[in-house]
Amino acid sequence: MTQTNWTPLDRNAIAKRVAQDIPEGWYVNLGIGVPTLVADNVPADREVVFHAENGILGIGPAPEPDKVNPWLINAGKQHVTLMQGGAYFHHADSFAMIRGRHLDLCVLGAYEVSASGDLANWARSSTDTAPAVGGAMDLAIGAKRVWVAMQHVTKDGTPRLVESCTYPLTSMSCVKRIFTDLAVIDVTPQGFAVREIIDGLGFDELQSMTGAPLIRQNAA
């Protein structure tokens, strides 16, 4: 397919678009990859409390290179900062927060999302090198809402939004909203409902890059 008058969002722009939709005062966990950039893009006048499953509440933006605390990392082993009022706690307490449904939102990356909201984000085959599903499973079922930030297609153009996932599942029917480099899409009982499309990209072209039917919304 020849791309003409549109440009996909880069990773930071996807994260910025996710940040726009997070309301004031929510407690939010960010997964590895594009989601980790969300904390850097929350509007300055909005308080969002970020959680890491290794035992941090109140994560701030990524540190400047000369201000890195080597002992302060998130679950993805990336250096982070701590906001005023932030806290450290035991790993078990962190997962009690998750399993007790105290998180308003978790933003995860994904390999595939199905039209019914199934999430596949930890392995691409039964022989993948990933040792286990890890904390993503707890987050997918424990957070009150799950949003996904991802590329719309793979490097070879294969759709990541599909009718049914072909990769090992992390959790079933958990994803509520998807932010890609091409669109913002809600998962509804009727399937994928398009909220927004990037400038210059038409609905039919977006559909051609999606492995399941799309539903038009007025915003699209």
Image: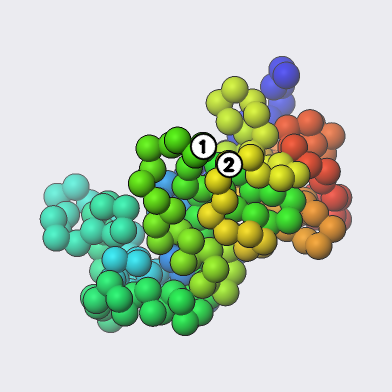
In the image, taking residue 160 as reference, residue 58 lies left or right, namely left
Task: Name the residue at 64% across, 48% down.
Answer: 113
Q: Is residue 159 visible?
A: yes
Type of the residue with mark 2? Tyr
Res 200 quadrant in image: top right
Q: Colour scheme in the image?
A: rainbow
Task: Name the residue at 39% across, 79% down.
Answer: 96
Front in this rendered view, residue 211 or 23: 211
Q: Looking at the picture, how far across and down is residue 179, in whole percent?
A: 61, 50
Res 62 quadrant in image: bottom left
Instruction: Judge whether 46 appears above or below 196 on screen.
Output: below
Instruction: Judge whether 93 appears above or below 42 on screen.
Output: below
Q: Looking at the picture, how far across and down is residue 90, in whole percent?
A: 24, 76
Callout 1 secondary element? loop
* Mark 1 nearby-residue class (10 Å; few <14, some 14–19, many ≥20): few
Residue denoted by label 1: 125
Type of the residue with mark 1? Ser
Residue denoted by label 2: 167
* Mark 2 nearby-residue class (10 Å; few <14, some 14–19, many ≥20): some
